Image (tube, rainbow, N blue to C red):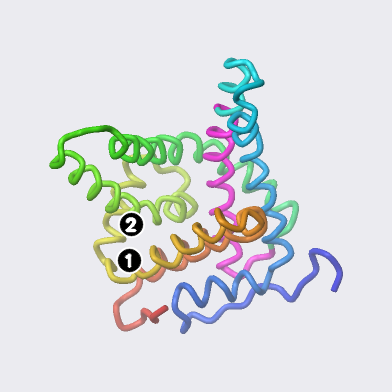
Amino acid sequence: MPFLDDTGPRDDSSRGPVAQAFAVFAGQVERLVVVNLLWALQLVPGFAAVAFGDVLPTAVRLVLAGWTAIALAAGTAVLYAVAALAADGGHVGISEVREAVREFAGPGVRVLGPLYAGFGFLLWLLALPTPVPATVLAGWLALLTLLIGGFWGPELAAHPEQGAARVLANSVRAWWRRPGGALTSAVVWVLLAAFGVLSVGGMFLAVPVLIALVQTETLRRASLPTRQVAHV
């Protein structure tokens, strides 16, 4: 099998979102692994800032960390755009990825950047020595944001012209329509993320794009009538 010349995407709307996500990934595995690797490379400057914190000057560490934060927001939007293309049965090639970068890198920084920063702020609040009621409230908000946040990327990929507030509002509506499906998918992609962190190789090769596919398929099923929605 020549590199980047695999069997192409597979589509079966009768599958649940998790099964369909894995089927799409299997259909374009080599191309999606390359896209995933390009996304993961944006983590390297941030890793360097942490790993060499005792050696690098503070200014350099801030630049590296800032680069990773901005590049990840842009790259994550591109990743979701590519995932949406693959989920539609489209060919994922060099030209398609370039087009996704041109169209989605800016909206990623503008929309996903503030949303992810807000989630990070909630996690930071959890780490503070605050009274128990405040900690409980922050914990519930963080959990709810985690569930709703699974729709941010797919929502932006579907409507890149939207602002952060509109993406957030539409994500809340999607979660409200299918809270059970959103919870099930969230469990799956949280487990995938944990595997990626623990294995390291999984994070660089497959896990982020698989998460993007699971979330994309989940959002699409949240827009379907109940009788048309398949289970996991």
Position of the N terminus, as image quadrant, is: bottom right
Q: CA distance from mark 2 to mark 1?
A: 7 Å
Q: Residue at x 58, y 48 (%)?
A: 78
Q: Which residue is mark 1?
A: 183
Secondary structure mainly formed by the magenta segment: helix
Q: Residue at x 36, y 47 (%)?
A: 167
Report if residue 67 lies within the magenta region.
yes
Question: In front: 14, or 126?
Answer: 126
Residue 231 lies, in percent from the top left, at 38, 80
Report if residue 220 lies within the magenta region.
no
Q: Residue at x 27, y 57 (%)?
A: 173
* Element marked by disc 2: helix
Q: Is residue 109 left or right of residue 5?
A: left
Instruction: Please rate how many residues cluster around mark 2, counting C-alpha atoms within 10 Å: few if below 14, some from 14 to 19, many from 20.
Output: many
Q: How many marks?
A: 2
Position of the C terminus, as image quadrant, is: bottom left
Above or below, 173 relative to 221: above
Question: In front: 128, or 169?
Answer: 128
Residue 222 lies, in percent from the top left, at 34, 68
Q: Which residues are magenta?
A: 66-91
Q: Is residue 31 left or right of residue 125?
A: right
Residue lying farthest to the right in this orientation: 2
Q: Which residue is mark 2?
A: 147
- Give the amino acid type for the residue marked by disc 2 in the picture: Leu
Residue 178 lies, in percent from the top left, at 29, 68
The circle on residue 54 is none
In the figure, residue 71 lies in which quadrant? top right
Q: Is residue 36 left or right of residue 190?
A: right
- Give the amino acid type for the residue marked by disc 1 in the picture: Leu
